[in-house]
Image (cartoon, grey):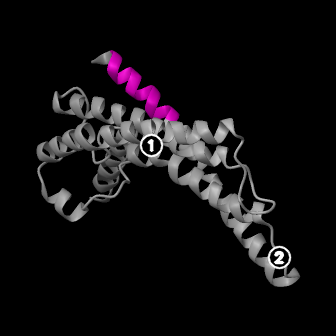
Amino acid sequence: MRRLLSFSRIIDRFSTRLGQIVAWGLLAAILVSAANATIRKIFNMSSNSWLELQWVLFGIVFLLCSPWTLLSNEHIRIDIVNNLLPKRVRNMIDLVGHALFLLPLCILMIIMSYPFFVRSFLINEQSGNAGGLPQWPAKALPLIGFTLLFFQAISELIKRIAIMRGRLADTPSGGGHHAAAEEEAKRLLAELTAESH
């Protein structure tokens, strides 16, 4: 289990670092979008490549930050119901959900997106719009994104099993990279409470 947790930590560090870097693509997409709108209004001109670039940047952020989102336990769930359940039940739901739904979805998307990307790459597919961008880099994003999400799902399964075996602290973030920060926050809060009394 120790080797698996080490492997999980490597995946977590990679997902965190990649997410922190790629998240800046959202700012780039906003700036490109604002520049496009400004130029269109002021100079009455537009560029298909810049319009397509803002969508590619959004796709990069959405697909390549998804492993970081899963790691940070920020993915969509019904928190009202989830928070009412005992931790053991939540752990089982996460274990079953990751194993029976997330991993098969990732595998299916990898299998389906690979030929989609390869065909586009081999013919050097270009945009159908005049002056647009090449299409194959954008078509690589689902393949890359779901591959990274697959590995993060494996990491989450490893951590969930370790939590259920008592090898890892069960925290709101699922024993992931936030666990140490959460424990430190609890310690500081306890110290502040003790000092105020």
Residue 64 at x, y = what percent? 53, 45
What residue span does the magenta drawing correspond to? 3-14
Q: Which residue is drawn at 81% across and 60% down?
A: 131
User: What residue would you read off at disc 1?
Assistant: 67
Work out whether residue 83 or residue 149 is closer to the camera in this orientation and state it. 149
Q: Which of marks 1 and 2 is nearer the N terminus?
A: 2
Residue 23 at x, y = what percent? 58, 52
For residue 57, say whether it is visible: yes
Where on the picture, by quarter, is residue 67? top left
Q: Quadrant of the N terminus?
A: top left
Residue 10 within the magenta-colored segment of the rendering: yes
Left or right: 45 in relation to 184: right
User: What residue would you read off at disc 2?
Assistant: 39
Prevailing SS of the magenta stretch: helix
Relative to 62, is 136 above or below?
Answer: above
Residue 163 within the magenta-colored segment of the rendering: no
Residue 86 at x, y = what percent? 11, 50
Relative to 95, is 5 above or below?
Answer: above
Mark 1, residues whose alpha carbon is within 10 Å: few (<14), some, or many (≥20)?
many
Relative to 15, is 42 above or below?
Answer: below
Q: Which amino acid is tagged 1?
A: Pro
Q: Is mark 2 on a helix, strand or loop?
A: helix
Which of the two marks, 1 or 2, is nearer to us in this view?
2
Mark 2, residues whose alpha carbon is within 10 Å: few (<14), some, or many (≥20)?
few
Left or right: 62 in relation to 151: right
